């Protein structure tokens, strides 16, 4: 297999996994699959992670995500 094929498969897997997180979080349902809302929320998150409050948001969101993945929500 060529190098570009390996990289393409890695990228495809990453995109599928990230899309799965959007679905698993229930975002599709609560937004009625409105991609403008979903994208806007993601832009807000990116902005928050570039702000003065970034570290606090990272810690809080990471813990919330870990708890959810363990089924403790």
Image (spheres, rainbow, N blue to C red):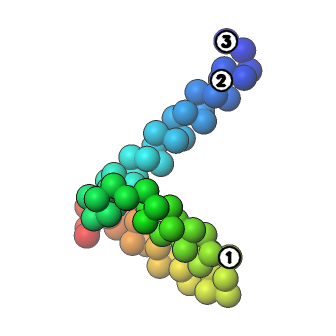
The spot of residue 22 in percent (x, y) is: 39, 55
Front residue of this view, candidates 55 and 18: 18
Which mark is nearer the camera, 1 or 3? 1
Q: Which mark is residue 50?
A: 1
Give the structural element (helix, strand or loop) at label 2: helix
The spot of residue 9 in percent (x, y) is: 58, 27
Give the structural element (helix, strand or loop) at label 1: loop
Q: Is residue 18 above or below residue 32?
A: above
Query: In terms of image quadrants, where is residue 46?
Result: bottom right
Q: Is residue 58 above or below residue 71?
A: below
Q: Give the distance between the C-alpha atoms of the residues marked 2 and 1, in whole angstroms.
A: 31 Å
Query: In terms of image quadrants, where is residue 2?
Result: top right
Q: Which mark is residue 6?
A: 2
Residue at image coords 51%, 68%? 40
User: Does the rendering let one see residue 7?
Assistant: yes
Q: How many residues crowd around disc 1 within 10 Å: few (fewer than 14), some, or many (20 or more)?
A: few
Residue at image coords 55%, 74%? 44
User: Does the rendering let one see residue 26?
Assistant: no
Q: Which mark is residue 1?
A: 3
Residue at image coords 50%, 61%? 39
Query: In terms of image quadrants, where is residue 38?
Result: bottom left
Q: Are marks 2 and 1 in contact (CB under 8 Å)?
A: no
Instruction: Give the left or right position of residue 69, taking residue 1 as reference.
Output: left
Q: Earlier in the sequence, mark 2 or mark 1?
A: 2
Instruction: Give the left or right position of residue 50, taking residue 60 as reference.
Output: right
The spot of residue 30 in percent (x, y) is: 27, 64
Front residue of this view, candidates 33 and 73: 33
Instruction: Give the left or right position of residue 58, taking residue 71 as reference.
Output: right
Q: Are marks 2 and 3 in contact (CB under 8 Å)?
A: yes
Q: How many residues crowd around disc 2 within 10 Å: few (fewer than 14), some, or many (20 or more)?
A: few
Q: Report the quarter where the C terminus lies.
A: bottom left
């Amino acid at each position: 297999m060529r190098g570009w094929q390996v990289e393409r498969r890695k990228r495809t897997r990453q995109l599928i996994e990230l899309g799965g997180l959007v679905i698993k979080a229930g975002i599709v349902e609560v937004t009625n699959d409105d991609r403008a809302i979903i994208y806007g929320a993601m832009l807000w998150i990116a902005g928050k992670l570039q702000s003065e409050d970034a570290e606090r948001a990272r810690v809080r969101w990471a813990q919330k995500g870990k708890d959810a993945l363990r089924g403790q929500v």
